[in-house]
Image: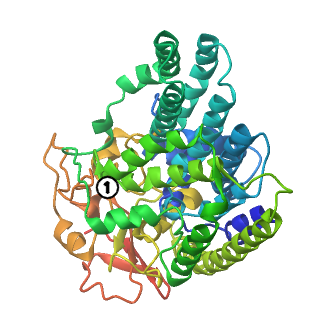
């Protein structure tokens, strides 16, 4: 029942409006369909390399052999909701030899800020990381070196799913092994050192591939790192609970804090597991908001930390005095809070689904294989201020899926999809739609030969809009009630809706 309530909002909409999701799904469409589409072959090429962000690339194309791409993508999203919960349950079982009611709390953080941002590769790999850590805990009595050899291929697989999830797993293992050593009094030192070396050995294959990773190849310009202000750290702290940052989710957060405080003295935390939380917590506190030009890095470890704590916590065994009533209170409170959160999530996702449908309808007037430039007027526009900006910006990526179009902000940095050389300078590996001001300024502009300019905004993007009238066939203006100001005269209206205008670029 908990699982159905948690995934209900995702399953109930046609296309989940989740941050980067549509951008990633467009890449999946290219992977699945490029062999049969001359238009896609004109714009894109598949470039398989050992990059550590391949969870979605490995799973969704397989699902797309059975289901339509939008359905395959939604199944993957549901897996991203369920797998972290399954990971916490596996860890609980490894610690206690049973599944109690506490792991149900993982459903309250299964829809979180990371999901709303569309960080799906990480969420999928995070569930696998928790399961792998549970297996490491459960196998603590195995012979150390055979154990390390067995785990090494799985750690490498986790690395290819997502490097940061692999790093989170390694932190948890480090804390677990240090905890074992402390409880043993570091005696005998020789055996403690051997255990530590075996734990490190499982990560060697992943480290070999990590040494070959060139993070800078996925960005334009110098890489940037910024720790972030106090506000961003507070948002990161509560990000495991907040799906959309609206009033309903905030009330759920407050009620969850109160319920946890009431139950805290009645919960037991496995002594073998809680030391794993220490290095994860320290790394979460030290994590920059922007690391090597990758945004939102400080949102990632708090969720892993919360799931570790949920997996480590338990009520005393059934039958002990007074415990049945507290279990009943915990289960009831969790179900009520999850239901409130799910109804609110469905309400927001339903509105976003309607906007995605509106976008697809307007873009349906565009011929297959067109080149589309996106203009976002206000920088927002969903009608829900709690919705991440990238949810709105990436809605027109449905043109890639529905019409095999060229869209310049399709992810093409550290991914399996690259732009054809002829279209490289007209795209950006990481970047945003243009503003009306940039649209006006870019008319008749040009990129100097041999120059690969950064847009100077710190996001690792490229100035791709200069001379747009030569490089694009259509321009989609996302208005959402805002005034775009005067538009260039070479834009011919083709289709419009309440929030969007599609223009054909007239050759002058």
Is 144 above or below relative to 163?
Answer: above
Instruction: Specify few, some or many for label 1: CA neighbours under 10 Å numbering under 14, 14-19, or 20 or more.
Output: many
Q: Is residue 483 left or right of residue 272?
A: left
- Picture coordinates of residue 478 (x, y %)? 40, 77
Residue 500 falls in which quadrant of the image? bottom left
Closer-to-camera residue (307/313): 313
- Picture coordinates of residue 360 (x, y %)? 56, 71
Q: Is residue 9 left or right of residue 424?
A: right
Is 361 above or below relative to 185?
Answer: below
Q: Residue furthest right?
A: 319
In this view of the protein, can residue 64 be seen by the observer?
A: no
Residue 408 falls in which quadrant of the image? bottom left
Query: Residue at image x 68%, y 21%?
Result: 141
Q: Locate the N terminus and report the quarter of the image it occupies.
A: bottom right
* Mark 1 element type: loop
Closer-to-camera residue (275/339): 275
Location of mark 1 (residue): 289
Q: Residue furthest front?
A: 321
Residue 74 falls in which quadrant of the image? bottom right
Q: Locate the C terminus and report the quarter of the image it occupies.
A: bottom left
Total numbered labels placed on residues in the image: 1
- Picture coordinates of residue 488 (x, y %)? 24, 78
- Picture coordinates of residue 119 (x, y %)? 50, 54
Closer-to-camera residue (481/165): 165
Q: Is residue 385 left or right of residue 346?
A: left
In this view of the protein, can residue 68 be seen by the observer?
A: yes
Which of the colour schemes (rainbow, by chain, secondary structure, one colour) is used? rainbow
Query: Residue at image x 57%, y 69%?
Result: 261
């Amino acid at each position: 029942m908990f699982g159905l309530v948690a995934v209900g909002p995702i399953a109930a909409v046609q296309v989940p409006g989740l941050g980067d999701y549509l951008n990633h799904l467009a890449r999946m469409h290219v992977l699945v369909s490029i062999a049969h589409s001359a238009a896609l072959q004109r714009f894109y090429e598949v470039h398989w390399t050992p990059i550590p962000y391949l969870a979605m690339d490995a799973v969704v194309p397989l699902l797309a052999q059975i289901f339509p791409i939008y359905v395959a993508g939604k199944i993957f999203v549901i897996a991203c909701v369920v797998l972290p919960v399954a990971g916490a349950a596996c860890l609980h079982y490894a610690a206690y030899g049973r599944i109690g009611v506490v792991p149900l709390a993982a459903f309250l953080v299964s829809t979180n800020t990371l999901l709303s941002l569309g960080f799906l590769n990480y969420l999928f790999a995070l569930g696998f990381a928790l399961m792998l850590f549970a297996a490491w805990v459960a196998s603590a009595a195995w012979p150390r070196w055979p154990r390390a050899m067995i785990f090494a291929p799985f750690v490498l697989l986790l690395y290819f799913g997502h490097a940061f999830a692999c790093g989170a797993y390694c932190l948890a293992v480090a804390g677990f092994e240090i905890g074992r050593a402390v409880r043993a009094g570091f005696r005998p030192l020789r055996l403690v050192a051997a255990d530590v070396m075996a734990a490190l050995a499982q990560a060697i294959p992943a480290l070999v591939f990590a040494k070959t990773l060139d993070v800078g190849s996925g960005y334009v310009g110098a890489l940037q790192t910024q720790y972030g202000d106090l506000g961003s750290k507070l948002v990161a702290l509560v990000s495991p609970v907040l799906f959309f940052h609206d009033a309903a989710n905030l009330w759920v957060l407050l009620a969850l804090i109160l319920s946890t405080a009431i139950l805290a003295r009645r919960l037991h935390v496995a002594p073998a597991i809680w030391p794993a939380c220490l290095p994860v917590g320290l790394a979460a506190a030290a994590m920059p908001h922007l690391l090597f030009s990758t945004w939102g890095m400080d949102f990632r470890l708090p969720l892993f930390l919360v799931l570790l704590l949920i997996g480590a916590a338990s009520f005393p065994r059934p039958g002990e005095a007074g415990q049945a009533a507290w279990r009943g209170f915990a289960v009831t409170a969790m179900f009520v809070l999850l239901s409130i959160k799910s109804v609110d999530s469905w309400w927001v996702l339903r509105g976003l689904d309607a906007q995605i449908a509106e976008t697809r309808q307007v873009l349906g007037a565009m011929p297959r294989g067109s080149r589309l430039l996106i203009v976002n007027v206000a920088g927002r526009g969903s009608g829900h201020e709690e919705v991440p900006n990238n949810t709105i910006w990436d809605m027109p990526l449905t043109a890639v899926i529905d019409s095999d179009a060229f869209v310049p902000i399709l992810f093409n940095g550290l991914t399996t999809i690259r732009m054809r050389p002829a279209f490289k300078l007209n795209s950006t590996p990481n970047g945003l739609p243009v503003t009306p001001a940039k649209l006006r300024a870019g008319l008749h502009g040009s990129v100097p030969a041999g120059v690969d300019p950064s847009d100077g905004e710190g996001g690792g993007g490229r100035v791709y809009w200069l001379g747009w009238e030569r490089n694009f066939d259509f321009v989609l203006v996302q208005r959402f009630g805002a005034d775009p100001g005067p538009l260039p005269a070479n834009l011919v209206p083709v289709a419009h809706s309440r929030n969007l205008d599609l223009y054909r670029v007239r050759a002058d």
